[in-house]
């Protein structure tokens, strides 16, 4: 995948234990959700198709958000991995993570976004390859 600067992003492997933990939590959540519609034992809820549709839409949106958040959390390309400015190569003055939010088709996502700040360039960067704007009061 090419970044906005034309550099080619390398595929990197996520930490297997972290991926396993996220997968197990998502499988558990999915199984709990599925029990609402197709319980292995016990009575079925007396839902109409419309009620199933409404409940399923909410559940699928939640699952979509959770899978996306898990994917972002384990993505090594989003982790702060370099302390050098991708533009001029100088050491970044500040780097770390900050809470970020984004609207998606599943609803609002919350995640940690890594950032770095280069004073000579006066720019802020995110390891995901996107230049981010400085907000007043940040850094
Ligand atoms: Zn720089």
Image: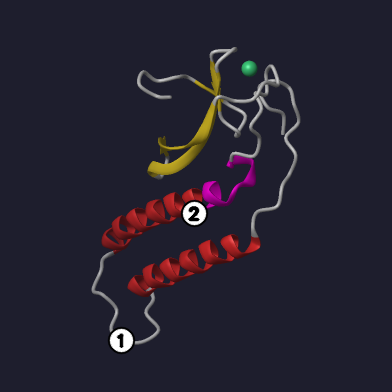
The residue that label 2 is drawn on is 67
Asked where in the image residue 14 lies, by quadrant, the reply is bottom right
Numbered tag placed on residue 27 in the rendering: none
In this view, the residue in front, 83 or 33, is 83
Q: Residues within 10 Å of mark 1 (few under 14, many from 20)?
A: few
Question: What secondary structure do most residues of the magenta stretch adopt?
Answer: helix
Residue 8 % position (x, y): 76, 31
Taking the image as shown, residue 62 lies to the left or right of residue 73, namely left
Q: Inspect the magenta stretch and tell me whether residue 106 lies in it.
A: no
Residue 131 % position (x, y): 56, 22
What secondary structure is marked by label 2? helix
Separation of residues labelled 2 and 1 (CA atoms):
29 Å
In this view, the residue in front, 53 or 106, is 106
Numbered tag placed on residue 42 in the rendering: 1
Which image quarter is the C terminus in?
A: top left
Disc number lying in front (2 or 1): 2
Residue 50 % position (x, y): 28, 58
Above or below 70: residue 102:
above
Asked where in the image residue 91 lies, by quadrant, the reply is top right
What secondary structure is marked by label 1? loop
Write the start and end of the magenta stretch as one range. 70-79
| Mark 2–mark 1 CB contact (< 8 Å) | no
Residue sticking out furthest to the bottom = 41
Q: Of callouts 2 and 1, which one flags the residue occurring earlier in the amino acid sequence?
A: 1
Q: Residue at x 53, y 32 (%)?
A: 95
In this view, the residue in front, 1 or 18, is 18
């Amino acid at each position: 995948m090419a970044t906005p600067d034309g550099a080619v992003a390398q595929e990197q492997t996520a930490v297997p234990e972290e991926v396993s933990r996220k997968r197990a939590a998502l499988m558990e959540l999915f199984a709990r959700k599925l029990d609402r519609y197709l319980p292995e034992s016990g009575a079925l809820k007396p839902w109409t198709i419309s009620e199933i549709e409404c409940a399923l839409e909410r559940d699928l949106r939640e699952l979509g958000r959770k899978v996306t958040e898990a994917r972002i959390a384990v993505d090594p390309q989003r982790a702060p991995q370099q302390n050098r400015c991708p533009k001029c190569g100088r050491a970044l003055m500040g780097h770390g993570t900050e809470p970020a939010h984004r609207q998606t088709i599943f609803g609002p996502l919350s995640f940690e976004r890594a950032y770095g700040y280069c004073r000579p360039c006066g720019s802020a960067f995110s390891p995901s390859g996107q230049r981010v704007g400085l907000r007043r009061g940040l850094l």
